[in-house]
Amino acid sequence: MEVFRMENLTYYYPQKDKPALSQLDVKISDGEFLVVAGASGSGKSTLARIISRLAPEFYGGKIEGEVKGSRDIGMVFQDPEKQLVMETVEREVAFPLENRGVERNLMRKQVLEVLSLLGIWHLKDKKTYELSGGEKQKVAIAAALALRNRFLVLDEPVSQLDPMAADEIMHLLKKLNDDLGFTIVLVEQRTEKCLSYADRVVFLDNGEIAFSGKPAEYVKWVGNHDCNFLPPVTELFWRLEANTLPLTVKQGRELINRCYDVSKEVLETSLDKTADKAVALEKVDFSFDDGTMALDSVTLDVGKGETLGIIGANGAGKSTALRIMAGLLKPCKGKAEAYGAVGYLSQEPNDYLFNDTVYEELLFTQKNFQKIDCDLIEEILGDLDIESKRNVNPRDLSGGERQRVALASVLAMKPQILLLDEPTRGLNKGYKMRLAAYLRSLKEKGKTIVLVTHDMEFVAEVCDRSVIMFDGQIAQYGSTREILSGGLHFTTDINRMFHGMASPLKIGEAECICTEKGRDGP
Amino acid sequence: MCHKLHPANAMVLIAVLIAAALLVSHPAHSALLVSVLSFSVAAFGGAGELKGLLRFWIATGIMIIIINPLVSTQGDTVLYRTVLPLVGRIRITVESLAFAGLMVLRLFSMVLVIKLFGLSIDRDDFFGYLSRYMNKLVLTMSMTVNMIHRLRVEIQRVSEVMAMRGLDLKSGGLVKRTKAYYPMIKVVLISSLEGSVNRAEALYSRGYGNGNRSFYREIRMTGKDRIHMAVLCIYIFVIVLGFSKGWLGFDFFPSISPKSDFSAAYFAIHAASLAILIETTRRCSAWKFSEWKI
């Protein structure tokens, strides 16, 4: 049964001449799990807003074509911080029911039911600002479900969460779809976590539907179109020219066992630790004003020209360690020193952007340091592929582009030590790989890089050494291969797939150790 | 369950205390307001935040005491006079210094009243109660409150980012420092406005403002709230009495003089009624923590 349909839909945001969506035909069936994929700025979020009627009802603008179907749709947004309205969890979930005028006793029943369904009953009396990112996103889903909407639209709900929280949210969506028959429309740029759950994938390109079909057909299509949209596991088999392209680690492992010989060893890259230190933390303790202990006796050396990855769950103290290295926080105990000019990229690229053009943004940093070097600005703009945006207001750019401008404004000061907090947030795989290549080129020029990230693929691509942090302490410190190999959670999908066979971390490494023993399928 | 102050009581309380903070011009009574409010904020569990407020107050207070006598040249008792290039004639008087002192007290009273308000209400109940009568106002208020909260967090973050980009926010004269703050303020304002739009979108998507609302929690005026309202009325009477007799007024210009003779008895009554009001508010607001039930 069809629950939603749009026919020949074209939508313009107010004061825009170019349509955000153009001549779209989309049908959604009851109980369907639809994934909407596409590059940044392709119109994915606009499609979500059209389905949930936020556009044009909230945003205004001009709409052509027809939109039919259910209006009882729950919407969950990208940023968990910005969508919670009330102070306590219970009241947050009750809020949409209050707005619909639901009678008090019925409201109470529905709130308690949805809290139990999502397994967040224990959070009932908590303040929403005390919750973790994953918990906040669950509360937002609960609020969307409280009205008994059986149709959910989610706009990149896991893009700002750590991998554990992201997995929990994805499992929850799967459960709602499988067990309770909810219709789910999930907008995602990185599809590795959701492709296996999808009944259908719609790929948007420049506001138009470039592909619509089953996930298995999608990976074949997108492999030929732009392999940057393939999940890592699928990309490996696409490169190996397999007949079947797996969507999950499990499917990939089965295919390897059936069709490939795997040579056991992947050579360890030799790591010569330089004697010169670039950053040193010595028995550093740090507590926030409210008494929360963020770092507990952390000792860490980063050698000159080294790239170090700091990984761990949310709240483990990663960003605090980075801010201490940058000199932004002073340790309560112990010593922290950086030997060289430090450039720092925070998690929020918008914090950097206020000038009228991208070029001026870079110039601003250089003016502050009284080191104006126009050639360097040109070089950075070219390296980060934002040359064409040089005269554009940075606030008019997409999320991924803003991230690159923020990084460019840091690089403009020519730092010796580069501290990056979640540099891949909002970037699609293509840009992520370009950033990785760029960071490697900086390393070759002798720069020291320390990055905090949840992105294990990126750590494997870029970092020589890595640190796992838990609860303000260093749990493990060593070469990236040592840290990620055999990890249950903090490792790459590729490594997980080869668990017990070999220890490749990257697609390229895995490709080298696989030899076909027989074609799969007819 | 923790009972918080009834939203109607909270609104009357904040209105009365703000009016008192702004209109009382007698330094002794202003100082009384500041000290009782500081004590009550600490008693409400805001002792840690009081330290931060004190730092803000001292810094702003010094600025006001420096700037006000330069701008206001009224008053009979001249302490210093000179002519400066560009600025012109400067005339620092005892009266303008004393008036600056009163403004510092008023500023801190206002900050403390707002802090006290935040500590004594259940924001969800307050939001729900107001939305019965003023839907659009509540929407605006919600976005503003959110913006203020975000501003605080963002100022910290953006100042770190700007410092790392070489912006010197600490050295140089007033003009240089004001200029240095410009990029930071611009970033913070743009981001906060964007954040508020996101919040409005979230409110809209949850059907806010669609029609008649129902309320998850019944907000009834309990016996405790009625007692609180009675105490509040007594305090309003004390304040009105003080103004009508001139005990709360004070003239600064052309020379310092109280509107009427200082009444120690009235001062004691004002102090007692204010203390009782604050204590009643505390007990109403944090019922489960109080040893004595009203």
Image (spheres, rainbow, N blue to C red):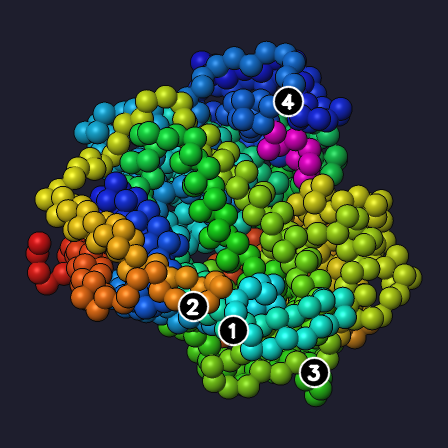
The residue type indicated by label 4 comes to Gly
Are circles 1 and 2 on residues that touch, CB within 8 Å? yes
Quadrant housing the C terminus of chain A? top right
Tell me the element at label 3.
Answer: loop
Rendered residue at 35%/64% (across/down): B258
Tell me the element at label 1.
Answer: loop
Discs 1 and 4 lie in a common subunit: no
Frontmost of labels 3 and 2 is 2
Q: Is residue B254 left or right of residue A383?
A: left
* Residue A514 rendering spot, x and y as whole percentages: 67, 54
Query: Dot 1 surroundings within 10 Å: few (below 14), some, or many (20 or more)?
Result: some
- Residue, disc 4: A61
Chain under callout 2: B
Q: CA distance from mark 1 to mark 2?
A: 9 Å
Discs 2 and 4 lie in a common subunit: no
- Residue, disc 2: B256
Chain under callout 3: A
Frontmost of labels 2 and 4 is 2
Discs 3 and 4 lie in a common subunit: yes
- Residue, disc 1: B77
Tell me the element at label 2.
Answer: loop
Q: CA distance from mark 1 to mark 4?
A: 65 Å
Discs 1 and 2 lie in a common subunit: yes
Q: B141 or A76, which lies in front? A: B141
Q: Quadrant of residue A138?
A: top left
Frontmost of labels 1 and 4 is 1
Q: Quadrant of residue B82?
A: bottom right
* Residue B245 rendering spot, x and y as whole percentages: 26, 55
* Residue A378 rendering spot, x and y as whole percentages: 88, 57
Frontmost of labels 3 and 4 is 4
Discs 3 and 2 lie in a common subunit: no
Q: CA distance from mark 3 to mark 4?
A: 53 Å
